[in-house]
Amino acid sequence: MEKFAQELAGKVALVTGGTKGIGKAIADRLLQAGAQVIVTARSHPGQEKLKHHFIAADLTIASETVKIVGEISKQFGAVDILVNNMGGSTSPSGGFGALSDQDWENDLQLNLQSSVRIDRAILPHMVEKKSGVIVHISSLTGVLPVYESLGAYAVAKAALNNYSKSLSKEFSPKGIRIAAVSPGMVKTDTMDSYLQSLSDTSGLSVEEVTQNLISSLGGIPMGRMANPEEIAELVGFLVSPRASYITGVNYIIDGGTNPSL
Amino acid sequence: MKKTEKELEGKIALVTGGTKGIGKAIADELANLGATVIVSARSLHDGNQENQFIAADLSRSEDIKQLANKILEQYGTLDILINNVGGTSAPAGGFSVLSDEDWEKDLQLNLLAAIKLDKALVPSMIERNTGVVIHISSLNGKLPLYASNFSYGVTKAALNNYSKALANEVASKGVRVITVSPGMVRTTAMETFLNSYGASIGKNLEETAQLVMDSLGGVPMKRLAQPEEIANLIGFLVSPKASYITGTNYVIDGGTIPTTI
């Protein structure tokens, strides 16, 4: 059901972590709307033929960010739409005591500093054109902290939310819109393998650990996880001209999971 | 922005207060997307004859019942309910100038009218296991003011809380419930307010708008919203594209709210 068929025609879009999961769904959605889409990831997803322009980059390394942004501006010109989708956690579960300094630093690199660096490299071009949209893919855990697992991830996402708001205050007057999107549980391959690993370590079935995880969030009123495409539709709307007054927000998309206002 | 398909074709939508301002823009957008749109207001204004009009004063319980009955008799059901009616008749001047009656009137208009209308119409949605309810709130519900709009903000905060609770209850029954909180919107009513307030302090409309924006701590986007920008967000939220969105409060304020949200 593609209604606003080519509303991103002529736009250059960059989606970090865009070869799988939510990032891939977003890249597909932006392509469908007519944008020229560049995706980054550490490695090419293998034999699968990509519809997007792929650039290999580990954005936790500062020099790679500078390199790919240079490459992109040479080949495609200025980026109009930046979706900071990469993120995640390499930390073990087990609560506060299980997290080392290195775990905290890794999660901060993945979820906060990688975005800061790529924004820093791309924002000047947007300022020059007095237009552009940046979306930070955050997480519900940024406003709904959990502790058994994803503790450091959640803290880093909360920092990303704060950073995104701050950035919007500075750059909205210059014609750039900046929004955060906080998905709840999304059924991606990564989620599946995360649930599998929880199952392996706990001896419980995947169904049981899924239910436990949902219960630890207080339940999902809608009774299911999101599909990546549902997140992509929201992002597709936010980067479009239809969202012209939306900046500085954090839009939660969680099937009602967040228990508070 | 070519529209190739009518994604709300066959849907029945009610927009309360739908003859002017944000409500009219929403009604027009939903009609654009293919919905059959019914609008209610106390009296008919010019230029809205394309939508079916039902006269109703939503500060009166009797009118709310009649409005719901008319819709259910004529269409058998409702797919999309936009609780847009709201406002304040309370004077400016802070806490002590607000009478019991001022509080009661604002509660009736901004909270109880929506509750009563939902009560009459949501059961038909639950019966069919599908439907979307939107509550048009206000940034004031999260960003309290006191010199003016004091009771208005309080009653909108109550609406936010109510909307979340309702979303929790009906999410498993196929009904999505969402709050949208606009910042300052350039409606005719807003212009009338700015003109009359401006006249009292010897300033023109633009100067007065700037003054009011400053009193909110500044609007990073440096302008008011157009009603159509609010309507675009509603058009997305009621569509099947927003299928995982419920229980949220989406702020649309050009970055006005100073805190992370």
Image (cartoon, coloured by chain):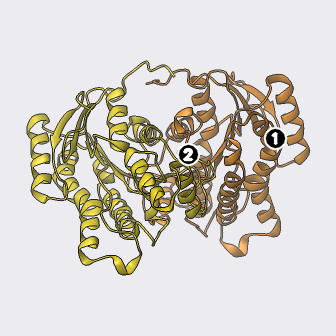
Residue A227 percent location from the top left of the image: 50, 41
> Which corner quadrant holds the C terminus of chain A?
bottom left
Residue at figure coordinates x 23%, y 31% from the top left: B51
Q: Nearer the viewer, residue B16 or A91?
A: B16
Give the numbered dot on residue A124: 1
| C-alpha span from label 1 to label 2 | 21 Å
> Which corner quadrant holds the N terminus of chain A?
top left
Query: Mark 1 and 2 residues: CB-CB less than 8 Å, in contact?
Result: no
Q: Which of B217 and A11 is in front in this view?
A: B217
Graded by Cα atoms within 10 Å as few (under 14), some (14 to 19) or many (20 or more), the crowding at tag 1 reads: few
Q: Which of B186 and B114 is in front in this view?
A: B186
Residue B78 percent location from the top left of the image: 21, 40
Residue B253 percent location from the top left of the image: 53, 51
Q: Which chain carries label 1?
A: A
**Quadrant hosting residue B129:** top left
Residue at figure coordinates x 34%, y 56% from the top left: B167
Give the numbered dot on residue A246: 2
Q: What residue type is labelled 1?
A: Pro
Q: What element carries label 2?
A: loop
Residue A183 visible at all: no
* Residue projecting furthest to the front: B202
Which chain does the orange colour mark? A
Q: Mark 2 lies on which chain?
A: A
Q: Left or right: B134 with respect to A149?
A: left
Along the polypeptide, which appears first: circle 1 or circle 2? 1
**Quadrant hosting residue A46:** top right
